[in-house]
Amino acid sequence: MPRRILQGTVTSDKNDQTITVLVERRFKHPLLQKTVRKSKKYRAHDPLNQFKAGDSVRIVECAPISKTKRWHVVTEATA
């Protein structure tokens, strides 16, 4: 099964080697046909503490690192 890659914005970098990434997705509501925005926060492993709040990053699924971390930062996303 391929690993998922998501793109989002760093909302918090206060924990050591961990960042919180807000990923937003848009989809059309099945009945109302209106575009809906949903967002979800993921905790990702950042071993070098190089990303700060406001950065746009890509994260990839990985084996569990801790109780809440199942994602790893790949690179900084380009606009």
Image: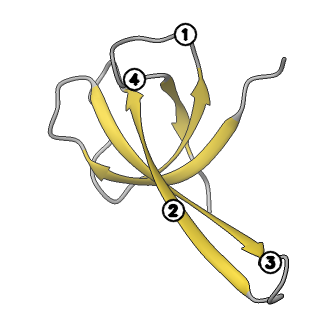
Q: CA distance from mark 4 to mark 3?
A: 30 Å
Question: Badge 1: how crowded within 10 Å, few (<14), some, or many (20+)?
Answer: few
Are dots 3 and 1 in contact, CB under 8 Å? no
Q: For mark 4, what is the residue? A: 69
Q: Which residue is mark 1?
A: 63
Q: Secondary structure at mark 2?
A: strand
Name the residue that disc number 3 marks: 28
| Disc 4, SS | loop
Q: Residue flagged by tag 4: what amino acid is it?
A: Lys
Q: CA distance from mark 2 to mark 1?
A: 23 Å
Tag shown at residue 46: none
Mark 2: which amino acid?
Ser
Q: CA distance from mark 4 to mark 2?
A: 18 Å
- Kind of residue at disc 1: Ala
- Give the image location of residue 67, x and y in percent: 33, 17
Relative side of 28 to 16, left or right: right
First reached walking from the N terminus: tag 4 or tag 3: 3
Q: Secondary structure at mark 3?
A: strand
